[in-house]
Amino acid sequence: MKHTRIHIPHRRDAFTLVEMLLVLGIIGLLVGVGVVSFGGVLEGGKNKTALGHINQIQSAVRAYEVDSMKLPTTSQGIGILVEKGKLKKLPVDPWGNAYHYRKPGTKDKGGFDIYSAGPDGIADNADDVGSWQL
């Protein structure tokens, strides 16, 4: 009786280096896209927070106007709102800077502007967030 050998193909139990590098590259790409997308979400949230603060300050300015029959001057600024009890404290914008107040406003000619200098911290440029956006 003749014995026949059955040939069993060799099984591969590991990934090759090329496969591992390819998977790591794809994961790195996905993480990079996620971080960029998440950064945009955070910036949008900061803008909404700033607009919320501005709305609060604007309401306090209107309350001050009702009590004193005039708007605060630019030199008084919004600090007068704390002195007169219209605000407990002045909020700081989401980028760590003080809010600005200007009367008469450059955006609201008949009234006033309240604004944040935005992400770059430089007032009066394109990235400002202000009462004119409410």
Image (tube, helix red, strand yellow):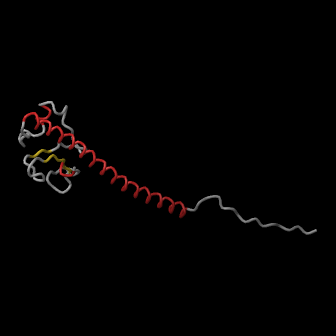
Residue 131 in the image: state x and y as whole percent. Answer: 18, 48
Residue 95 in the image: state x and y as whole percent. Answer: 24, 45
Tell which residue pokes out farthest to the right in this image. Answer: 1
Task: Identify the residue at image location x=37%, y=56%.
Answer: 37
User: Relative to 115, does residue 60 appear above or below in the rendering?
Assistant: above
User: Relative to 2, does residue 126 appear above or below in the rendering?
Assistant: above
Task: Identify the residue at image location x=49%, y=58%.
Answer: 24
36 with respect to 128 (left or right): right
Q: Give the total of numbered labels.
A: 0
Q: Nearer the viewer, residue 57 or 99?
A: 57
User: Relative to 75, does residue 2 appear above or below in the rendering?
Assistant: below
Residue 43 in the image: state x and y as whole percent. Answer: 30, 51
Residue 32 found in image quarter: bottom left
Which quadrant does the N terminus fall into?
bottom right
Task: Identify the residue at image location x=28%, y=47%.
Answer: 48
Residue 122 in the image: state x and y as whole percent. Answer: 16, 51
User: Relative to 43, does residue 83 appear above or below in the rendering?
Assistant: above
Q: Nearer the viewer, residue 111 or 4?
A: 111
Q: Nearer the viewer, residue 90 or 66?
A: 66
